[in-house]
Amino acid sequence: MPAITITEIEKAFELGLKAYETNTTPSKFKHVLIEELGMNPNSAHGYIETVGHLLSGHCYTRTINAPATEYYLQQIYQRFTIDKLKIAVEAVRKHLDYYLTTKTSQQQAVRTIYEKYALICEEEFDFSDLEKAVQVASNDSSENRRLRLESAPKEPILIDARTKLYRRNPDVVAETLYRALGVCENCKAKAPFARKRDNSPYLEVHHIKMLSAGGLDCIENTEALCPNCHRERHYG
């Protein structure tokens, strides 16, 4: 069977999205992939159907290749909220767990993609709530924040054991940003821009040892980084 092309993947996603949004069975749309792109009927159905499973968080047992998994998650991340991405990542986890029970394939390439997007979910968990809490903490004094931090638990609270999402302490974020004084603690460059909200220098707080790897949620385990250095820490 010929490899599934990116053209087929892109078209299948759009058809799957349409099927999901209109609550229509994938079989109503698979003829487009078959007639226009010459896709195998079973593959056409599976690639369309999987989009709906990802968006609803359901386990899917049909296999789609790694490039399709990456493309589907990327599109969901770009088009929907972070909450929808979490649902899709959970569906991929269920799929991987299912394949472990069959002992036919560990799908290592797909697992790597899953871990990448699970990390995105971890970093952006309850981001809007965290941002508001950080703003409140930033308006307080450094002395008060440090007093709270002395008695605050350093072990992060696990919110969802399935995708390892942790609740972050806003005092840790605020105090780390305060310590940096608007300068990246890695490259020593000034923050690239100011936040619209309060004109404060934009830096991102990074856990030196990731929470998911047992790192503590404390200022000793954090650094304030410019966006470039933050990406380099994760992907460089």
Image: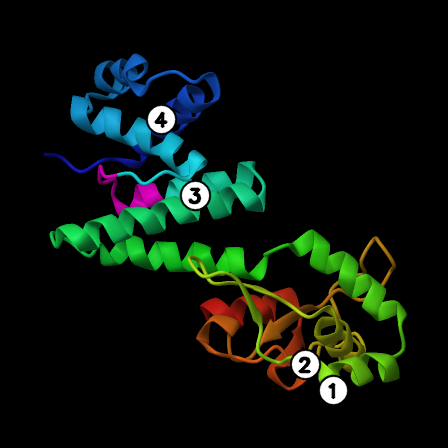
- Badge 3 or badge 1: first in the primary sequence: 3
- On screen, residue 228 above or below 197: below
Q: Residues within 10 Å of mark 1 (few under 14, many from 20)?
A: few
- Badge 4 or badge 1: first in the primary sequence: 4
**Residue at the location (43% across, 26% down)?**
17
Quickly name the residue at label 2.
185
Amino acid type of the residue tagged 3 in the rendering: Ala
Quickly name the residue at label 4.
11
Mark toward the viewer: 3 or 4:
3
The segment highlighted magenta reads 61-70
- On screen, residue 53 above or below 152: above
- Left or right? Give the position of 34 relative to 10: left
Q: Residues within 10 Å of mark 2 (few under 14, many from 20)?
A: many
- On screen, residue 13 above or below 223: above
Amino acid type of the residue tagged 1 in the rendering: Glu
Instruction: Please tell me whether mark 1 sits on a helix, a strand or a loop.
Output: helix
**Residue at the location (82% across, 69% down)?**
137
**Residue at the location (71% across, 72% down)?**
173
Mark toward the viewer: 3 or 1:
1
Name which quarter of the figure residue 149 lies in.
Answer: bottom right
